[in-house]
Image (cartoon, coloured by chain):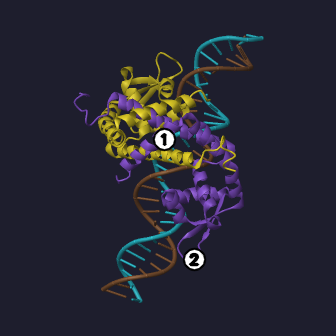
Chain colours: A yellow, B purple, C cyan, D brown
DNA sequence: TGATGGGGGTTGACGTGTCAATCCTGTAAC
DNA sequence: GTTACAGGATTGACACGTCAACCCCCATCA
């Protein structure tokens, strides 16, 4: 039965590789998230928002631009900005240029949080990911990630 | 500055590869999760629980065994079993052998759900992951995933 | 007999993400 | 002008995970 469905179903070996792949990526994500949290009291979601804002002109972005930039849905961003605002990391204000639209601005405290979190985080990425792999392996990761991305992108 | 910290900080290129890697894995996970959900009204968490139970003797496992088997914390499992029980996928009952301990048993409805979800899910894994890669690339994934795993495991 | 402690499991609070519904306001259509 | 609509953002309900506190029952030991 497994044999006959070869074209549809992954083999046992393929499935093993898949599971290892996805679980390892998950483990990595969790580990890094935990470190970021304990080092700088930021979640990786916070980090993404802070990174985008800190690179933006005047540390400010339209809410919808920000959402697009980091690939989030409006609703998710709105919820998250609400929480970040409560912690004083960002502030929202009506956008002067556009009657619709909200400006999201990085506060000084948010900028400082990001600054303090950034270096340890990058160090962690090096330690947990880069250092695990040989230069050849790293190149292979790049290659097959690209293949995966190409495979997935055209799909809606 | 970036140059001087070479040993600590990833290079721009390494960082690019890292981001691609982790974001692609995330995209894949999300896509598969969405398909599983729409095909069989199961989350991947549901799936893991159902898979473990459906392979168990008498479709039943001690709660703590189940947690260990799928690598979850007790609390997570307890919450999730509560939700699954409400949907009629599993049932909990005191374990006759052991005074402590709870038996988790797959219901007929749960087994049927799993049966219906399983094949499409495996097909999706093949389509979204396996089919994107050449056999050589698949072998490379296996290899560097193993390297990553070895690198991460000894760390607490 | 009564305190101590540990394994097994649950609970509550909270942060997070998704979906669908809603609100607001300017603009096009009639 | 009023209605319709579309873009931008928020809200509420819910599923999910984590953390820390807790409950229960038993074993051990004083």
Q: Does residue B14 appear anywhere in the picture?
A: yes
Q: Which quadrant is home to the N terminus of chain B?
A: top left
Q: Which quadrant is home to the C terminus of chain B?
A: bottom left
Mark seen at residue B139: 1
> Relative to A7, does residue C7 appear above or below in the rendering?
below
> Relative to A136, does residue D2 appear above or below in the rendering?
above
Mark seen at residue A119: none
Q: In which quarter of the image is residue A9?
A: top right
| Residue where numbered disc 2 is placed | B97
Residue for point 65% across, 60% down: B90
Where does the image place residue D2, in percent across and percent down from the top left? 73, 17
> Relative to B20, does residue B71 appear above or below in the rendering?
below
Mark 2 nearby-residue class (10 Å; few <14, some 14–19, many ≥20): few
Where does the image place residue C1, in percent across and percent down from the top left? 41, 89
Residue nearer the viewer, A64 or B40: B40
> Relative to A100, does residue A39 appear above or below in the rendering?
below
Q: Chain ID for label 2?
A: B
Residue for point 42% across, 39% down: A44
User: Which SS class for mark 2?
Assistant: loop
User: Which SS class for mark 1?
Assistant: helix
């Amino acid at each position: 039965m497994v044999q006959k469905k070869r074209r549809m179903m992954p083999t046992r070996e393929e499935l093993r590789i898949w599971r290892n792949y996805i679980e390892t990526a998950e483990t990595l994500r969790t580990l890094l998230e935990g470190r970021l949290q304990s080092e700088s009291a930021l979640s990786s979601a916070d980090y993404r928002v802070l990174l985008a804002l800190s690179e933006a002109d005047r540390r400010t972005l339209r809410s919808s631009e920000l959402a697009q930039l980091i690939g989030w849905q409006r609703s998710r961003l709105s919820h998250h900005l609400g929480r970040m605002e409560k912690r004083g990391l960002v502030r929202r204000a009506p956008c002067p240029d556009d009657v619709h639209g909200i400006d999201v601005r990085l506060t000084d405290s948010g900028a400082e949080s990001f600054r303090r979190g950034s270096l340890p985080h990058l160090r962690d990425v090096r330690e947990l990911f880069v250092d695990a792999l040989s230069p050849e392996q790293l190149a292979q990761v790049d290659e097959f990630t690209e293949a995966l991305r190409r495979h997935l992108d055209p799909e809606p």
